[in-house]
Amino acid sequence: MSESVVRVAVQVDRLCWTGILLGLAFTMTNVQQFAAAGSLPWSLAWCAAWLLDPMVSLVLLAILRAEQVTAQHGVRMGGWVRAAKWFTLAATYVMNTWSAFMAGSAALVVLHSVPPLVVFVAAEAVTELRDKLVAPVVGPAPEPVAPTPRTSFTEYLAVAQAARTRDVKVTPAWVREVTGCSRGLSSRLAAALAEQEVGL
């Protein structure tokens, strides 16, 4: 069952991305006409106009893909990322529908509005769809494990001092037994205890 759900999640992801790419490809000619502004075909301005839509679309695709990956790890993107995504989507929509609004044709406005709006809706939905499909299979993310604080030399020494009695012969092995410290540290602790005993 889990493999089937993961397979469906992959299919949904691919279909959504295919729709996004097709939508952006459809908008390319409209943006080129908007940018060319009546320039002669194959002129420098006409050729350069083809660069505008890929420039905006590639930035948008990079942001969408990054959002999808970071969302899987529970990382929230900053305000600049959201602003860049909304700006590129809005720029694509405006450049696609500008000539239709100027012509006053409702049919053209609808025609040129559908692809960028599909891209917008799919961009918002693709990450959530994949997360909702995969989450029941993978399960909730494990709780982060709090790091164990390290015991200092002074703390180990205090434990050994409290456990020492008059009849105890202080050795590294005894120090390890009562404190649970490492072999290397037990020698230092035993030496420190011996010095204290001499001082007494």
Image: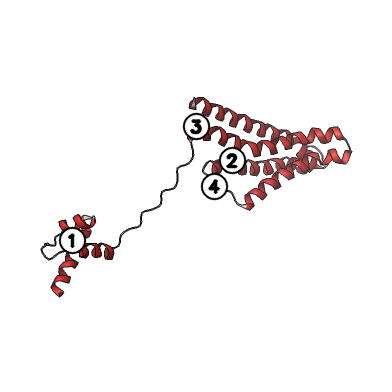
C-alpha distance separating marks 3 and 1: 51 Å
C-alpha distance separating marks 2 and 4: 13 Å
Count all numbered tags in the image, as a single digit: 4
Q: Residue under label 1, please give it.
A: 187
Q: Residue under label 4, please give it.
A: 75
What x and y, as percent, mark residue 35?
A: 78, 43
Observer-nearest of 60 and 75: 75
Front tag of 3 and 4 = 3
Amino acid marked by disc 1: Ser
Q: Residue under label 3, please give it.
A: 137
Q: Residue under label 2, please give it.
A: 65
Of callouts 3 and 4, which one flags the residue occurring earlier in the amino acid sequence?
A: 4
Front tag of 2 and 4 = 4
Front tag of 3 and 2 = 3
Q: In the structure shown, which secondary structural element does the residue marked by tag 2 occupy?
A: helix
C-alpha distance separating marks 1 and 4: 46 Å
> Which image quarter: residue 182?
bottom left
Q: Residue at x 59, y 40 (%)?
A: 65
Q: Mark 2 packing: few (<14 Cα in 10 Å), some, or many (20+)?
A: some
Q: Which mark is residue 138?
A: none
What x and y, as percent, mark residue 54?
A: 68, 40
Of callouts 1 and 4, which one flags the residue occurring earlier in the amino acid sequence?
A: 4
The image shows residue 3, relative to residue 37, as above or below, that is above
What x and y, as percent, mark residue 177?
A: 19, 55
Q: Mark 1 packing: few (<14 Cα in 10 Å), some, or many (20+)?
A: some
